[in-house]
């Protein structure tokens, strides 16, 4: 199940998750979102725009209910960032204190990367923990990133690190909640293998 | 740095056919963009770019269908350019399965389009395509429109600076003088743009030999686009990556098949 809360390329995410043979539905329905066996929260635009879109379909509530119930949920790119308590990215139009607050599954803020060339765009390596289930059987592969902001620290679950200017959190596995700063649906066969690993645990 | 250099084949599509690819090797239907996209993906392309050069609206509809079919099979980033005039055009392409769009002529005619697209979809979806040629402007580079056929008199570097302010995710820097010649990228142009902009630069136009690629990286490019060199079988993506890896650059060599 993929949560639809704004425009964007949800189709390639749908096709990538469908390679597992599972039925993949794009939805913004509250009940369907809460009850799905697995829910993917893609990222749309900047942090504040993402929160605005999410709130419009009560996506923040869907995520909180699922996390409390231990239902598998995967945030991708900005969909990972909004799982933290706070975003610092400025928005073009709607800057508000309210929309700087994330869903708050994890403590921490999303900060700008310190690198001469931004966005961090392209294929980069990851350093997952040895017993990671998400990265199980996937070694020495690169994944596709597009972002200028990231979590630079986190004190939850299993953390995968990457480096671009700074060291940043590129994936989190925290019980039923998974998050990747990179796009598995755009990371070729390595990304599909990751999706396969996640779906196998549903 | 652990970020890989991106190697990007570019497919010029006209009315559903790849037009530079007539001599492309190993393909029964040499001009089918979806088939070529799949082949480049399996050869290790890091992204794909479709440039729609169709003049007609039916040609554009065909391109949407090609994007749709490609996105069902190829799970690497896909950029689509050509004829985009509005945020609605961008929306249709993203919904069909494109990840990024490149704009050129429409943005020069109406720069606000950049801000409109960035606001609606985020600047990361927006690739500013700059078709520049040597001319007597302030920097010595002039930006052109309509696939290089129309000079604007506008200085290319000033245009890049303005576009960066409006919110672009990267620059596709195409040298009209070098395009199709396979005699090397315009290194001076890459250096000049690198000095004034902090978004990634995709070098385009002129790639023909292996050392062309590394020279563009030294000049400041972050990604390397080529069409003729790959289509006509002169070089393979694997050869370019092996060469760059031997020269000490980080390239993606996927092992999962």
Image (spheres, coloured by chain):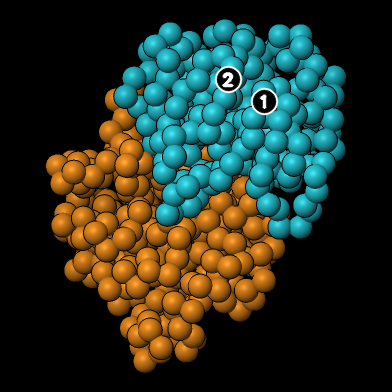
Chain colours: A cyan, B orange
Residue placed most toward the observer, B253 or B159: B159
Place of residue A200 in the rendered image (x, y in percent of width and height, measured from the top left): 54, 9
B59 horizontally vs B132: left or right: right
Q: Chain of mark 2?
A: A
Residue placed most toward the observer, B77 or A58: A58
Secondary element type, mark 2? loop
Evaluate if marks 2 and 1 touch, with contact meaning CB atoms under 8 Å apart.
yes
Mark seen at residue A155? 2
Residue placed most toward the observer, B20 or B117: B117
The answer to which image quadrant residue A63 occupies is top right
Q: Is residue B243 visible?
A: no
Query: Which residue lies at the image location 23% right of the left edge and 56% below the top edge?
Result: B213
Placement of the C terminus of chain B among the 4 image quadrants: top left
Query: Which mark sits nearer the N-terminus, 2 or 1?
Result: 1
The residue where tag 1 is placed is: A107
> In this picture, is A130 found above or below B71?
above
Q: Are marks 2 and 1 on the same chain?
A: yes
Instruction: Using the numbered discs, state the Cα–Cα distance from disc 2 to disc 1 in whole angstroms.
Output: 8 Å
Q: Residues within 10 Å of mark 2 (few under 14, many from 20)?
A: few
Secondary element type, mark 1? strand
Q: Residues within 10 Å of mark 1 (few under 14, many from 20)?
A: some
Place of residue B93 in the rendered image (x, y in percent of width and height, measured from the top left): 61, 51
Query: Which residue lies at the image location 27% right of the left edge and 63% below the top edge?
Result: B219
Q: Chain of mark 1?
A: A
Placement of the N terminus of chain B among the 4 image quadrants: top left
């Amino acid at each position: 199940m993929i949560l639809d809360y704004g425009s964007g390329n949800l189709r390639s995410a749908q096709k990538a998750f469908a390679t597992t043979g599972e039925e993949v539905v794009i939805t913004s329905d509250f009940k369907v979102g809460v009850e799905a066996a697995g829910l993917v929260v893609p990222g749309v635009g900047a942090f504040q725009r993402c929160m605005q879109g999410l709130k419009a379909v009560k996506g923040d509530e869907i995520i909180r209910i699922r996390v409390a119930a231990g239902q598998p949920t995967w945030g991708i790119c900005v969909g990972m960032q909004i799982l933290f308590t706070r975003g610092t990215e400025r928005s073009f139009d709607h800057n508000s204190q309210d929309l700087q607050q994330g869903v708050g599954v994890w403590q921490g803020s999303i900060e700008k990367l310190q690198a001469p060339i931004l966005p961090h765009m392209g294929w980069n390596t990851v350093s997952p923990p040895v017993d990671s289930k998400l990265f199980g059987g996937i070694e020495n592969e690169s994944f596709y990133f597009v972002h200028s902001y990231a979590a630079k620290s986190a004190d939850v679950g299993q953390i995968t690190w990457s480096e671009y200017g700074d060291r940043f959190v590129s994936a989190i596995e925290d019980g039923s909640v998974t998050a990747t700063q990179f796009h598995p649906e755009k990371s070729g066969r390595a990304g599909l293998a990751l999706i396969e690993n996640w779906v196998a645990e549903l | 740095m652990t970020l890989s250099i991106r190697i990007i084949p570019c497919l010029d599509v006209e009315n559903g056919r790849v037009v530079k690819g007539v001599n492309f090797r190993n393909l029964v239907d040499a001009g089918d963009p979806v088939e070529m996209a799949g082949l480049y993906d399996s050869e290790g392309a890091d992204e794909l770019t479709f440039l729609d050069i169709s003049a007609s609206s039916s040609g554009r509809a065909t391109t949407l269908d090609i994007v749709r079919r490609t996105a069902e099979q190829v799970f690497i980033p896909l950029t689509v350019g050509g004829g985009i005039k509005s945020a609605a055009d961008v929306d249709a392409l993203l919904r069909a399965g494109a990840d990024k769009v490149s704009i050129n002529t429409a943005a020069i005619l109406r720069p606000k389009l950049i801000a409109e697209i960035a606001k609606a979809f985020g600047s990361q979806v927006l690739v500013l395509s700059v078709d520049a040629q040597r001319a007597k402007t302030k920097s010595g580079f002039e930006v052109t429109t309509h696939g290089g056929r129309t000079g604007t008199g506008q200085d290319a570097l000033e245009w890049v600076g303005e576009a960066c302010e409006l919110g672009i995710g990267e620059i596709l820097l195409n040298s009209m003088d070098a395009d199709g010649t396979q005699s090397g990228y315009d290194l001076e142009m890459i250096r000049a743009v690198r000095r004034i902009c902090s978004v990634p630069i995709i070098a385009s136009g002129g790639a023909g030999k292996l050392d062309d690629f590394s020279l563009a990286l030294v000049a400041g490019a972050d990604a390397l686009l080529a069409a003729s060199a790959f289509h006509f079988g002169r070089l393979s993506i694997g050869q370019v990556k092996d060469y760059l890896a031997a020269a000490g650059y980080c390239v993606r060599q996927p092992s999962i098949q």
